[in-house]
Amino acid sequence: MTRNVPVSLANPNVLVDNPNIWLELNKQAGGNPDFTPAEIKTFYVIGLISDICQSVEWLLKASDAWPNKYLPAFALFASGVDLLGRCLTGNATADLQGNLGVGFHYLARPNLQPPAKNIPKIDQEAVVVVETNRCQYTVADLVALRHYTAHGQATSGSKLPEIHIELLDTFPKLMGNAMETYWKGLQTDNEYCNRMGSAKFEPYNNRAEPLRHTIEYFSKGNSIGSLFYRLDWQVYK
């Protein structure tokens, strides 16, 4: 059956939990009625990650962003990376282990092939995500830092990295590159679609704004990456 849609997944009919929730959300957002629940879910998560990154920018625009808002800004961004990781792994349970490491690893090394569902500790410690003039931050460093900012503790046995004002500078570009690659993967690889379908998350209280934002942005011919490339996270003392 021919569908009148401007963009589509490689497998738009992959099963998702509670498809009627996504179809109703699409109605609220004024989306194309030919979009499938899997496509709606995909557009929603893109918009939600974009909203998270926009919120990081608002924190970093505060006059006391460094150092007072810097760690909260990183923690907020890491929640977006964790969500991306959940979509990449297709994690269908409440288990949070692995998603964050996969997400940061994908930022460092985006690939059209679906990533491993768990990144071995040796690779997390070896793969550099961010390099500033004074420090390198590996996947393991960033995972430990996120656990500290969220829970007041690092991963067991992990040494927290030093925090430099340049840490967040390159993340908009890294996220933009990762999301561009991820979107291409979703359009060409069934396994990416399968994992998106099984990833455990639902919209909050029928909040349609992330979905509406993505649909409107796509309708203007914009790329996914440009949602993030336009952000400026440099902070000046």
Image (cartoon, grey):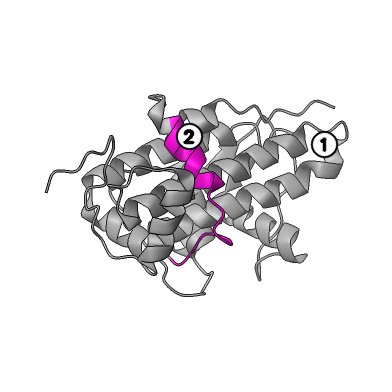
Labelled disc at residue 86 = none
**Mark 1 nearby-residue class (10 Å; few <14, some 14–19, many ≥20):** some
Determine if residue 29 is in view: yes
Compared with 92, 169 (above or below) is above
Q: Is residue 81 magenta?
A: no
Q: Position of residue 184 (x, y in %)?
A: 30, 39
- Label 1 and label 2: CA atoms lie apart by 23 Å
Q: Secondary structure at mark 1?
A: helix
What residue lies at 71% left-to-right and 56% top-to-bottom? 160
Left or right of 4, for residue 232: right
What residue lies at 77% left-to-right and 42% top-to-bottom? 70
The furthest residue to the left: 1
Q: Quadrant of residue 7?
A: top left
**Residue type marked 2:** Gly
Compared with 211, 82 (above or below) is below
Magenta segment boundaries in residue numbering: 200-217
What residue lies at 43% left-to-right and 38% top-to-bottom? 215
- Quarter the C terminus occupies: top right
Q: Quadrant of residue 110?
A: top left
Left or right of 17, for residue 194: left
Q: Position of residue 12 (x, y in %)?
A: 25, 52
Which residue is disc 1 drawn over? 65
What residue lies at 76% left-to-right and 49% top-to-bottom? 72
Of marks 1 and 2, which one's residue comes earlier in the chain?
1
Which residue is disc 2 drawn over? 176
**Residue type marked 1:** Ala
Q: Secondary structure at mark 2?
A: helix
Q: Position of residue 46 (x, y in %)?
A: 47, 45
Q: Nearer the viewer, residue 117 or 210?
A: 210
